[in-house]
Amino acid sequence: MSHFKAPPKKSLGQHFLTDRSYIDRIVLAVNPQPGDRLVEIGPGQGAITFPLLRKHGELTAIEFDRDLITPLMEASEGVGRLTIIHKDVLSVDFGKLANGERLRLVGNLPYNLSSPILFHALEHAEAITDMVFMLQKEVVDRMAAGPGSKVYGRLSVMLQAYCQVTPLFVVPPGAFRPPPKVDSAVVRMAPKPREDIRVNDHARFSDIVRAAFGQRRKTLRNALSGVCESSEMEAAGISPDARAEQVEVAGFVRLANLPHASAI
Ligand code: SAM
């Protein structure tokens, strides 16, 4: 008999993965190794949790829905050591959770929160080895896009500056219960080692990228007026007449790293 009785909650983005072949592919993508600290975001009814637990013996899961906590604990009996953190994932400090080790995050994320969760995880990038996440395919396309693509934007630049982003495979709506309206995709993100991250001033980088793509139809000269001078763009090797979608990630990094008047 199933432990899970509550119907799926739309407000919490609950679309439970039921197709065995995609569950297997996610477990294969995670490929847990001895000693890994696995942390799942949003275990739901345990579609990914229990196969991972069976393989790895141990897992921490962060779930906001109180109705799922007891059923998850009951269903884990005899499978492995499941620790549940009953919290909003956005309030979880991954640095503290890692406690000097590094975490491997996995999750079929609630789609309404996917960008906030990605940015939250990035704040603790030093505590994370990698993340294997299921998201809306459209979001994965934006994360992995390069200059010249229609969907290249703030999310692409911010994530690619700090992470290696690798789209893995597409998952159709029929693999879930209830089915979402859109295709999903699984992506791996691996935070770059500190020495490979070229951004010196993270706040300035974020401000520049936000302003540049905030008005993506405008030239950078206009979109970035008040944020940086045309002479700075030229010094960074970027034409002030270009638009944000034409500038590669490294260009934004060079621009943000220039000595800036307000910082002197
Ligand atoms: N992993 C399960 C699966 O694949 O079937 C469930 C995935 S479902 C798309 C998203 C899960 O995230 C749900 O269990 C939902 O309750 C949980 N969730 C939603 N908002 C959350 C939050 N802020 N913090 C933690 N978990 C959350």
Image: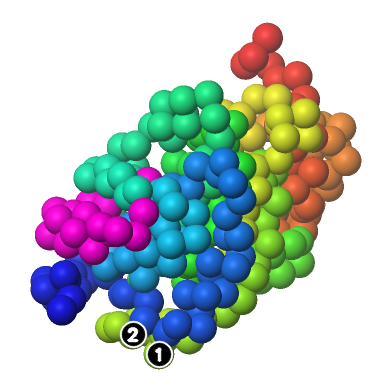
Q: Earlier in the sequence, mark 2 or mark 1?
A: 1
Q: Position of residue 183 (x, y in %)?
A: 48, 82
> What residue is shown at x 36% (from left), y 54% (from top)?
80
The span picked out in magenta is 60-80
- Identify which amino acid the numbered label 1 is placed on: Gly
Q: Is residue 23 left or right of residue 202?
A: left
Q: Nearer the viewer, residue 83 or 238?
A: 83
Res 216 → quadrant: bottom right
Q: Residue furthest top?
A: 264
> What residue is shown at x 25% (from left), y 57% (from top)?
77
Circle 1 sits on which residue?
A: 174
Circle 2 sits on which residue?
A: 179
Circles 2, 1 touching at the beta carbon (< 8 Å)? yes
- Establish whether ligand 1 lies closer than 8 Å to the Cβ of label 1: no
Callout 2: SS: loop
Looking at the rendering, the quadrant in which ligand 1 lies is bottom left
